[in-house]
């Protein structure tokens, strides 16, 4: 029984330090035919923690099927000058990537996150045409759905 236990422990240690890692991304996808305005606010993080969400989101182009095609990655211009407020104009067929998890699987906003990760999302407004969507920390999981490592809200 001891040799089996040692093999299991050694295998687990090798997996831990083998460099295997994965990412899960948080994004808003603009699948509509018009620009959308996204405003969001981050919470102040505690000392010694790592934030999930960033104030410097990336823009990624989308394929015809609505998946990331990685042809055009760009920093998005923040029109809000406050430290925790972000305002982005997102073009059609682009996604705004505004957060990620490393080596952790997103289940919901209230879960325990490894590596001292903090769910530092406060609120988001998405404006398109005459529509305004208000997303808060409490209703985040009603709007953002996970599929294949992407936690996204789609504007159509």
Image: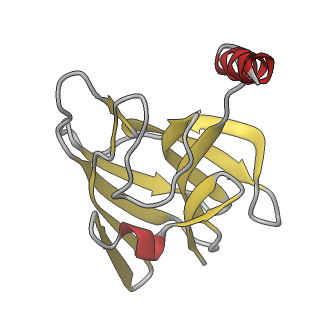
Instruction: Tell whether 43 sits left or right of 21.
Output: left
Labels in figure, total: 0
Is the N terminus in the top left, top right, bottom left or bottom right quadrant?
Answer: top right
| Residue at far front of view | 1
Point out residue 134 in the picture as x, y percentages from the top left corner.
Answer: 30, 74
Q: Which residue occupies the foreground of this view, 1 or 35?
A: 1
Q: Is residue 56 left or right of residue 3?
A: left
**In this view, 145 is above or below 43:** below
Q: What residue is at 56 percent from the left and 62 percent from the top?
A: 152
Q: Farthest residue to the bottom: give it.
A: 130
Q: Position of residue 89 (x, y in %)?
A: 45, 55
- Tell me the quarter of the image containing the C terminus: bottom right
Nearer the observer, 13 or 147: 13
Q: Position of residue 14 (x, y in %)?
A: 72, 15
- Residue in view at x 64 percent, y 20 percent: 16
Q: How is the image coloured?
A: secondary structure
Q: Is residue 32 above or below residue 146?
A: below
Residue 75 visible in the current orientation: no
Q: 133 or 23: which is nearer to us?
A: 23
Quarter-of-image position of residue 141: bottom left
Instruction: Report the residue at 79% width, 16% height from top.
Output: 3
Can you say whether 117 is above or below 30 in the image?
above
Q: Is residue 88 visible?
A: yes
Q: Locate residue 135, reporting x and y percent.
A: 32, 70
**Image position of 74 (left or right of 71):** left
Residue sitting at x 51%, y 40%: 100
Name the residue nearer the viewer: 9 or 95.
9
């Amino acid at each position: 029984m001891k040799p089996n236990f040692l093999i299991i422990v050694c295998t687990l240690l090798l997996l831990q330090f083998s460099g295997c890692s994965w990412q899960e991304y948080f994004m808003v996808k603009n699948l509509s035919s018009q620009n959308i305005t996204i405003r969001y606010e981050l919470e102040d993080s505690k000392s010694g923690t790592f934030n999930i969400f960033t104030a410097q989101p990336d823009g990624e182009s989308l394929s015809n099927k609505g998946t990331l095609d990685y042809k055009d990655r760009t920093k998005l211009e923040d029109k809000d000058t406050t430290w925790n407020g972000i305002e982005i104009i997102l073009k059609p067929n682009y996604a705004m990537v505004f957060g990620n998890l490393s080596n952790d699987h997103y289940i919901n906003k209230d879960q325990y996150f490894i590596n001292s990760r903090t769910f530092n999302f406060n609120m988001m407004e998405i404006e398109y045409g005459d529509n305004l969507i208000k997303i808060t920390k409490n209703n985040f999981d009603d709007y953002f759905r996970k599929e294949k490592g992407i936690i996204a809200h789609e504007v159509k």
